Image (cartoon, helix red, strand yellow):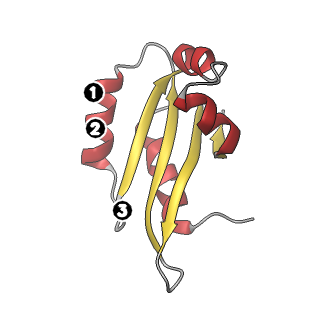
Amino acid sequence: MTENPIIMNVVDQILDICNPHMVILFNKKYDLFDSLTSFKLCVIVPDDVDTNELECNLYLELDCENPFDVLLYRNSEWNNLREDEASFASKISKTGVVLYEL
């Protein structure tokens, strides 16, 4: 299955801005005409990344015609939380679609 080009364009922009370990699509919505209306990405970054600063930079620099959200995890956080069945990271890990992996 080929992912929506709008989403993949944002993934490419993320790769240009930072060096993530992984980018996962965990939500996308379409209207009645099958046009993408919004989407959500989870981005796993190295442990030394300031996620607060990166989040601000991503929202300022990413260019997309559709509303989107980006959820950031440091690699160690991701590895710990995805093992916790009660965590959102675990749900994303099980149901999301990996769009990029280092």
| Mark toward the start of the polypeptide (3 vs 2) | 2
Q: Residue at x 55, y 19 (%)?
A: 75
In which quadrant of the rendered view does residue 49 lie? top left
Q: Classify 10 Å Cα crowding around label 1: few (below 14), some (14-19), many (20 and above).
A: few
Q: Position of residue 56 (x, y in %)?
A: 25, 36
In which quadrant of the rendered view does residue 64 lie? bottom left
Q: Confirm or deny contact between disc 1 and disc 2 (CB under 8 A).
A: yes
Residue lying farthest to the front in this orientation: 86
Label number found at residue 64: 3
Q: Residue at x 70, y 38 (%)?
A: 94
User: Left or right: 99 with respect to 77?
Assistant: right
Secondary element at tag 2? helix
Q: CA distance from mark 1 to mark 3?
A: 20 Å
Q: Observer-nearest residue: 91 or 6?
A: 91
Label number found at residue 57: 2
Residue lying farthest to the bottom in this orientation: 33
Disc 2 residue type? Asn
Secondary element at tag 1? helix
Disc 1 residue type? Glu
User: Left or right: 53 with respect to 21?
Assistant: left
Image height of 55 relative to 32, above or below: above
In which quadrant of the rendered view does residue 51 lie? top left
Q: Classify 10 Å Cα crowding around label 3: few (below 14), some (14-19), many (20 and above).
A: few
Q: Position of residue 1 (x, y in %)?
A: 75, 65
Disc 3 residue type? Cys
Q: Residue at x 49, y 65 (%)?
A: 29
| Mark toward the start of the polypeptide (1 vs 3) | 1
Label number found at residue 53: 1
